[in-house]
Amino acid sequence: MSNDTLLRALARQPTGHTPIWLMRQAGRYLPEYNATRARAGSFLGLAKSPALATEVALQPLERYRLDAAILFSDILTIPDAMGLGLYFAEGEGPRFERPLRDEAQIARLAAPDPARELRYVLDAVRETRRALAGRVPLIGFSGSPYTLACYMIEGSGSDDWRHVHLMRRSRPDLLHRILEINARAVADYLNAQVEAGAQVAMLFDTWGGTLDAAGYEEFSLAYMRRALAALRPVPTILFTKGGGAWLEAMAASGCSAVGLDWTIDPREARRRVGDRVALQGNLDPAVLTQPEAIVRAQARRVLDAFGPEPGHVFNLGHGISPQASPDAVAALVDEVRAYSERMRG
């Protein structure tokens, strides 16, 4: 591989610079992405076309000296393959036609066969890996079992996840049934991505951080541990937005790296997890809407906080917003490479 810096950082090995990739690095802030999406006709049309998914996955690498590509897909492909009827309402985000609200539905729930029901994703992995031709590693991903369950029960995004919390308090057995199926489905899905060519697997636990401490352990982390334990031996990244209270437990989950959101002090994270795992993060995504001088200064601040020790992957504390400036991203990638090289000099 021409550039294996990410893989070495995830193994906590010395690197010549801090590797950088960005959550949602292929997205609406890029004009070329918007042009490809327009050709596809819809987001789902884009995600379900392996050729177009490959095209947009590689677009950021044509602009920036990034150290990884990430599969272009959506975290809700698994519940869509379970028959819940995923669709995207204009301006409202993802929705399901048939959310899980009754016992009979939940009893019928089954993990999909990735080779059959999610073949378009695996084809995108294969095409993207071939197109990369050893340039940088390819990251595969899935939503976490709990995050998937939130959308599956609620039927859409939510400010309060009312139906989810009602189920976990009144019928926790039903929620555990969903999570057991989801953990199996996530492991099968990520293993299929690895077989197709993904070299790193990431779990996005977007909504685990909305739980209390006991709830996080019981309903989110326990099922991520199950999924991680069933994975093929590739580097893994676990990211819980709002998960700063549980860094030690996350580091002990079996993952290779813990992703940090922008609310966590990297120095404190280093102190709490030691050298058990690599750390990924954690620039505030809002910085990428600001002038170049601020972007560069904030990049240096994050790098200084993590220090030159092995085991840091530079990323945002969440995904790039559509309002980010492509020029700001260019300044960020350039500053991370140049400054981290000087730190190791």
Image (cartoon, grey):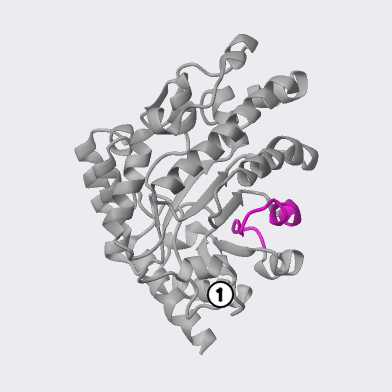
- Residue located farthest toward the right when viewing the structure as drawn: 214
Q: Position of residue 237 (x, y in %)?
A: 57, 54
Q: Which residues lie in the magenta part? A: 245-264
Q: 47 left or right of 200?
A: left
Indicate whether residue 36 is drawn in magenta: no
Is residue 259 in sight in this rendering? no
Q: Position of residue 85 (x, y in %)?
A: 43, 20
Please give the residue where the numbered disc 1 appears in the rendered image: 303
Q: Nearer the viewer, residue 26 or 16?
A: 16
Which residue appears at 35% of the width and 60% of the height? 325
Q: Position of residue 240 (x, y in %)?
A: 62, 48
The quadrant holding residue 110 is top right
Q: Nearer the viewer, residue 171 or 119?
A: 119
Which residue appears at 39% of the width and 71% of the height? 3
Q: Is residue 81 above or below residue 273?
A: above
Which residue appears at 48% of the width and 57% of the height? 286
Q: Point out the image quarter for the N terminus.
A: bottom left
Q: 170 left or right of 318?
A: right
Which residue appears at 43% of the width and 81% of the height? 338
Check disc 1: other Cα within 10 Å, few if <14, some if 14-19, many if 20+.
Answer: many
- Residue located farthest toward the left when viewing the structure as drawn: 39
Q: Is residue 197 above or below residue 43?
A: below
The quadrant holding residue 88 is top left
Q: Position of residue 18 (x, y in %)?
A: 50, 74
Q: Is residue 344 above or below residue 268?
A: below
Label count reads 1
Q: Secondary structure at mark 1?
A: helix
Is residue 150 in sight in this rendering? yes
Q: Amino acid at mark 1?
A: Leu
Q: Nearer the viewer, residue 259 or 81?
A: 81
The quadrant holding residue 335 is bottom left
